[in-house]
Amino acid sequence: MACALVITGGLIFDHQAETINQERVRTEVQNRISVIRAKLEGHVASNVQLVRGLVAVISTEPDMDQARFDALVGNLFEEDSQLRSVAAAPDLTIRMTYPLAGNEKVIGLDYRKTPGQWDAVQQVLFTGKMVLAGPVDLVQGGRGFVGRFPVYTETDGWKKFWGVVSAVIDVERLYRDSGLYDDFVSDLDISITGHDSRGGHGKLFYGESLAGRQPVLASVTLPTGSWQIAAVPKAGWMAGQNTQWLLRVGIVLAACLILLPFLIAGRMISQRHDYIAQLRHREAALTQQTRRLNLALETSKVGLWELNLETGEEVWDSRTNEIYGMAPDGSERTHDHWQKVVHPDDQARAEREFRDSIARGRYESDYRVLLLDGIIRHIRSIAVLYSAEGEPDRVMGVNWDITGDVALNEDLKRAKALTEARNAELEAARVSIEHNALHDSLTGLPNRRYLDEKLRKCIDAGYLQSGTIALLHIDLDRFKQINDTLGHAAGDAMLVHASRILRENCRETDFVARIGGDEFVVLSDNNEAEEALARLAGRIVDAMRKPVLFEGHECRFGVSVGIATAMVPEIDVKQLLINADIALYRAKDRGRNRHEFFSAALQAEVINTKRIADDVLTSLDRGDFLAFYQPQFDARTHDVVGVEALARWKHPTLGLRGPDVFMAIAEELSVVPTIDQIILKQAIADLERWDAMGLRVPRASVNVSQRRLHDEGLLASLKDLDIPPDRIAFELVESIYLDESDGIVGWNIDQIKSLGIDIEIDDFGTGYASIVSLQKLRPRRLKIDRQLVDPIIKEAAQRRLVASIVDIGKSMDIEIVAEGVETMEHAKILRDLGCDILQGYAFARPMDRESLERLLQSQAWRHAS
């Protein structure tokens, strides 16, 4: 029985020893991850506390700009924190961020249009509390935890939602500062769950899943929610079990002694259990106290100190040394060190308060310290007297830097005083402000806001005498030239002069306003119909034409007037302003210094132009622009020497349209270069097609717009097309190369020639080209405009003019192309005058690719010639 008891007891003891060993290892792991948990809680809480201070400032300064924002957030970043960036989003759109460098992408980000972040922002809106999300992938790169804080402003006791402040805590920095990468946990497998602060039920975001490995768990308490840390030794819970075998040998030896060793071992096991229970209780209490102390120290930035009243020696922690501007090197400190850094003006008071308060057992005081670099800090110190039997009396206290709070209080006091002073001024200035809000400060005329109110009254009150209302939109012509040449003072004088003329020529019942830089409006009841409005506009135009003297300079300018009318009370204010503006631009287009009435025909023209513009843009996407070709012939042999590629628009409903329908609108839309590129690509492709068919077309001439020649990327796009040398010619109108100062155009033309592309001058004789400009450009061909060619049959002088152009081209080794050859008689005269190439209806009209191929195969023009 004794042996059976010993064996049974040995087995039990062996199992308990194994359990104790595992509990010891689990306790050790628990202690290590408790340190990490405390640091995580402390770091997150301190970062949140820093941003809460920023939120408090924004709520008092809702209109702060980027500079003020940078100054405030910059102070936060000077603290030992893990903040990576802070962004402010008034009305849920990010307007400010710090640091700006590297975070430019987030400026303008609208949370409502960002699904990945809108859920978290909605949670902030619904709860009115800060929400910590993450870790998330950041727009500017990297990963971080994002704390979003609601900001409310208070006006007259009412809270108003201002927006959201988002603070990004850098993931890697938080992990590193919290000890996750330190050596003391290198032998542990650690994981953290609780994505978006959801605790143990959340997603895993650090480490690998430890499910099934019986991990030690610790909960990280966050400002909103929690995380759960899990840890197991990398070698498993059975590591370090070698001593178990020694214990088993002891059990065998104890079995040999039968009873006595058995009893002794039982007693030892009982004592061991009691000791382990005590250790667990003490460790739990110590862990809780450590967590609380670390959290308090980290979040409050409090420094600890202790004074031995018997020896005068003091012990300062690193934070206290930092507060007093001393190195945290562990050097001995005394009461004298403290006295030396206290501001001279506060020394006597601080010392007196310390002595008086310690005598009562509790000390609390605010004072300033003067650091070696001249910086002054405001310090709050609290301490208690500690006495223990057999030990000298000690004073244990805490310090923290309240400089920011003092500065904030001072700012608030100044802001309050300033607000009170401004409130006293506001009532006195109210009338002046209302007047200034409705009038132009320069001319004294009503402004755009006043005009809008006036128009609204026309609708609401219907107080006009007649049944219609007229609006004259007036714009000064040549005002910019006066401003640029004589300065803004001259421009201001002209505006004052213009406002005076408008007042003098309008009735007292007319409403005159300045709505822009050099734009004015006259609002009239139009009780004499259009004739009276025309006379009024005429008087204004005539009066504005008269010269005005300014500091000895004679200034001249004119006006263009657009007039629109509407019936009362069915007035569409926006449409009335638009109609007057349309009429104004029509007046400018027709030569300025005149007036124009808005009409249904003008509106139809605007609508038609808009429709054509929309159709042009749609056709560009659909590929509706085609190349048509007009052949060019040798003047003597009538052989085809080239074709001119012309743009045609295959309208989806109206059919084929020429450049006269769309080119002007294309210029306004800045898509002429795109059309040129389309025609060029088609011409290159068709040359390859004709070569493959055995049809001889030596070259194709393509029009090039002035805008495209100003494109710095023109050469790169041409090189990508792989244009065959001497097969493509670019036709330029005279005005393109007249501006000799345009370096980009000249350089592009030289580079175009180097690619084997010929340069031709189109419509020669209709512009202002000079012989010198021709010498500089050195074109390959010169095309005489059809206006010069058409009269040569009947007018000898015109033939001599064409002959002169031919002689000029021949002298410069330039081929001469005559366009507009309508009859064979034209062809013969031009051949005799020396023209090299002929183009016109006498031989062939512009045609599509298939028609040109049939013409080339049939040689039909030879029969006509």
Image: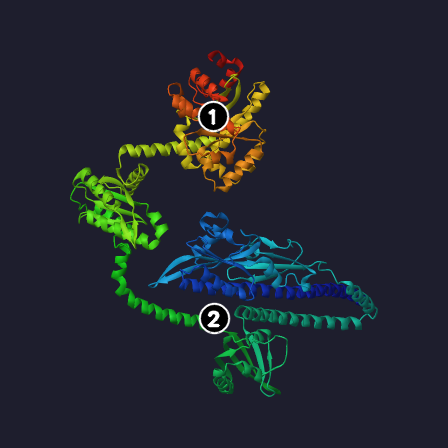
Q: Which residue is nearer to you in this view: 227 or 380?
A: 380
Task: Give the residue at x 51% y 28%.
Answer: 811
How crowded is the residue under tag 1: few (<14 C-alpha within 10 Å), some, or many (20+)?
A: many
Q: Amino acid at mark 1?
A: Val
Task: Give the residue at x 30% y 41%.
Answer: 581
Residue that badge 2 annotates: 404
Secondary element type, mark 2: helix
State left or right for residue 384 relative to residue 207. Answer: left
Residue 656 visible somewhere in the drawing = no
| Disc 1 from disc 2: Cα separation | 87 Å
- Residue 288 percent location from the top left of the image: 58, 69
Where is 124 relative to 23, above or below? above
How crowded is the residue under tag 2: few (<14 C-alpha within 10 Å), some, or many (20+)?
A: few
Q: Which residue is nearer to you in this view: 728 or 826?
A: 826
Instruction: Tell me the quadrant of the picture where the N terminus can be found.
Output: bottom right
- Residue 351 percent location from the top left of the image: 51, 85
Q: Amino acid at mark 2?
A: Gly
State left or right for residue 633 relative to residue 275. Answer: left
State left or right for residue 257 relative to residue 573. Answer: right
Residue that badge 1 annotates: 806
Q: Earlier in the sequence, mark 1 or mark 2?
A: 2
Where is 496 relative to 621, above or below? below
Q: Which mark is residue 368?
A: none
Which corner quadrant of the image does residue 477 belong to?
A: top left
